[in-house]
Amino acid sequence: MSEIIPVISATGLFTPPETITNEELVASFNAYVELFNARHAAEIAAGTVAELAPSSVEFIEKASGIKARHVLSKASLLDPEIIAPRWPERPNEEVSVMAEMGIKAAQDALQRAGRDPKDVDAVLCAASNMQRPYPAMAIEIQDALGIEGFAFDMNVACSSATFGIQTAADFIRAGNARSVLVVSPEICTGHNNMKNRDSHFIFGDVATAVLVEAQDMAPHPHWQIIGTRLKTVYSNNIRNNFGFLNCATPETIGTPDKLFVQEGRKVFKEVVPMVATMICEHSGDLGLDHAGLRRLWLHQANQGMNRLIAQRVLGHEASEDESPTVLDTYGNTSSAGSIIAFHLNNADLAAGDTGVICSFGAGYSAGTVFIRKVA
Ligand code: COA
């Protein structure tokens, strides 16, 4: 029996229409800081409560490269009395928020591939956070799209999408499925602590979808998956303790470590070499020269990290053409970031061009997906 080759047939994107610029974000954050400090003036003077410091547009752009982010709930995020996303709770009969955005991204991918949902065999919802434990978000998305077969959720933080692509590719190689949708709805503002000056600016909301299929059924052009590799190394430097075992009282929900927290400097230092080495070694094992890769679609968390990783892989300072950025307008969108970079920056490449989609983040976790364009 000849080997079944997995390919990326199409990708899809759902971008929330509302955006928040750094200027808007900092103005509301600083209004919150002023309110907090005024309300706690006596405790601050007595030394029992720490005074809050204001945020700054210049710091955010210089430290991260982020200028704006798309969000699902702009008004409440900018309200100094709330500084958090707010959605009306939906009845069980209505599509859930996370599924809704995943469905839109999936429909975009299916339409680009000219794929009838009836021919899709599986849906993976691969994202950093699920809005509920069960029924799986993926099954709700599967049902809404009219897909038969099976669906399940998987979470590997910022690497969820690349882990999902490898899982889909393995299903296809093994003959367990021929067409698999990997959907990554990321509502990052829902798990970020928007009152934490160190990280209030980091995240945005978005959803992506990747249609992974057997080559013999794929539309043209498509991207042949020539190698995938996954890596995890335990670290507490990015952590979110939210969960049913530790939020038994209303007071514990929303306390700082029940939302995203990180040691950004340590993450930067430890993850850059890990990821650069992983791309170079995986290239070598595939018989590729890493310096000759046509494009790197890197995870979008910090422009300094991406600059360093790309430089180590390519051997020179990467141009925007070699390592495109979407971080400036999307912020960090967790597992969706490298997929957005690919989605918006692949049409111009020629047949035979080879590149890598690479994710990295909490876990630590990292994934490399080497792909080559087939016209
Ligand atoms: N506005 C103004 N100043 C701020 C600030 C803000 N919003 N947040 C922090 N600062 C200050 C700090 O208090 C600190 O001041 P000090 O030097 O007087 O102590 C200074 O800026 C530097 O803070 P630091 O946290 O060390 O900044 P940084 O240069 O490391 O940048 C990150 C912070 C988070 C942008 C950066 O570390 C990063 O992106 N790391 C990688 C994270 C990552 O990829 N995570 C993956 C998540 S999925």
Image (tube, rainbow, N blue to C red):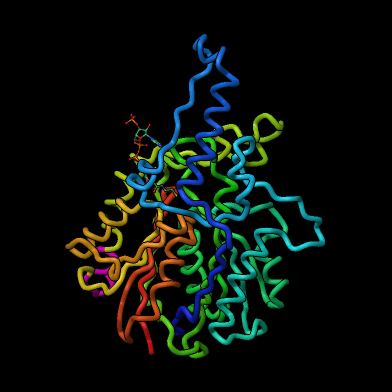
Which residue sits at x=52%, y=89%? 217
In the rendered image, residue 238, in percent from the top left (x then y), is placed at: 45, 42
Q: Quadrant of ligand 1?
A: top left
Q: How many marks?
A: 0
Compared across the picture, whether 371 is left or right of 261 comes to left
The image quadrant where one finds the C terminus is bottom left
Q: Is residue 196 above or below residue 345?
A: above
Which residue sits at x=66%, y=71%? 150
In the rendered image, residue 305, in percent from the top left (x then y), is placed at: 31, 52
Residue 272 in sight here: yes
Nearest to the observer: residue 197 or residue 181: 197
Q: Does the magenta stretch include residue 88?
A: no
Q: Does the magenta stretch include residue 285?
A: yes
In the rendered image, residue 49, in percent from the top left (x then y), is placed at: 53, 17
Please identify the quarter of the rendering in which residue 270 is found: top left
Q: Is residue 304 above or below residue 176?
A: above
Q: In this view, does 344 lie above or below 154?
A: below
Please identify the quarter of the rendering in which residue 109 is found: bottom right
Nearest to the observer: residue 272 or residue 206: 206
Q: Is residue 9 above or below residue 278?
A: below
Magenta stretch in the rendered image: 280-289
